[in-house]
Image (cartoon, rainbow, N blue to C red):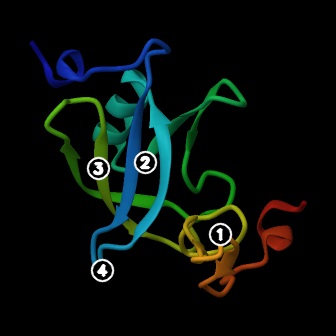
Amino acid sequence: MGLLDQLKYDENGLLPAIIQDAENGDVLMMGFMDRTAVERTLTEGKVCFWSRSRKKYWVKGETSGHFQLVQGVYVDCDMDCLLVKVTQVGAACHEGYRSCFHRKVTPTRTLELIAERIVDPKEVYGK
C-alpha cells in the first residue's frame, strides 16, 4: 500500500497540513489537502491545497508569487495530519504577514498583534 493510501483522510477526504518555515521553525499557516493535493505537493515541490470555500485546488503563491517551496513532508503518528517544512517566499498570509498566526490571545482574551505586515495585500491581490 502506497503512502497516499495509508493517510487517514476525514469524511470529506481531507487532512490538515501545517506549514512550517524549514529554517527557523515558525508555523506559517495551516490548510487542507486531499489525496491529489498531497500528490501534487510531493511531485511539484510547491505546496498545493484544496480550498474548501472555493472548491478547487490552489498552489500557495499562484496569485501572489509568495510560493512555499517544499523542503520536507512529515506525517504524524495517527497518519491524519501533515507537517510540511518549506522555504517561504514572501508572505504566507493573505493579509500580508509572514505568518497567518500574527495575533496572540492575551490573558484577558483580547487579540494582540505580534507581527508587522510585510506586504500590502491590496498591491498583491488587488482587493
CB atoms at circles 2 and 1 under 8 Å apart? no
Query: Foreground mark, 2 or 1?
Result: 1
Q: Amino acid at mark 2?
A: Val
> Under tag 2, what secondary structure?
loop
74 shown above or below 101:
above
The Cα atoms of the two marked residues, 3 and 4, are separated by 14 Å
Q: Which residue carries the number 2 mark?
A: 47
Q: Is residue 122 left or right of residue 50?
A: right
CB atoms at circles 4 and 2 under 8 Å apart? no
> Under tag 3, what secondary structure?
strand
Residue at 37 percent across and 22 percent down: it is: 35
Q: Which residue carries the number 3 mark?
A: 83
Q: Is residue 126 left or right of residue 82?
A: right
The Cα atoms of the two marked residues, 3 and 2, are separated by 11 Å
- Counting other residues with Cα less than 10 Å from the Cα at mark 2, is it few (<14), some (14-19), or many (20 or more)? many
118 shown above or below 54:
below
Q: Earlier in the sequence, mark 4 or mark 2?
A: 4
Q: Is residue 67 left or right of residue 117?
A: left
Q: Amino acid at mark 3?
A: Leu
For the N terminus, the quadrant is: top left
- Counting other residues with Cα less than 10 Å from the Cα at mark 1, is it few (<14), some (14-19), or many (20 or more)? few
Query: Horizontal and vertical percent for residue 108?
Result: 65, 76
Q: Amino acid at mark 1?
A: Arg
Query: Foreground mark, 3 or 2?
Result: 3
For the C terminus, the quadrant is: bottom right
Q: State the residue lying farthest toward the left.
A: 1
Q: Which residue carries the number 4 mark?
A: 24
Q: Quadrant of residue 23?
A: bottom left
The Cα atoms of the two marked residues, 2 and 1, are separated by 33 Å
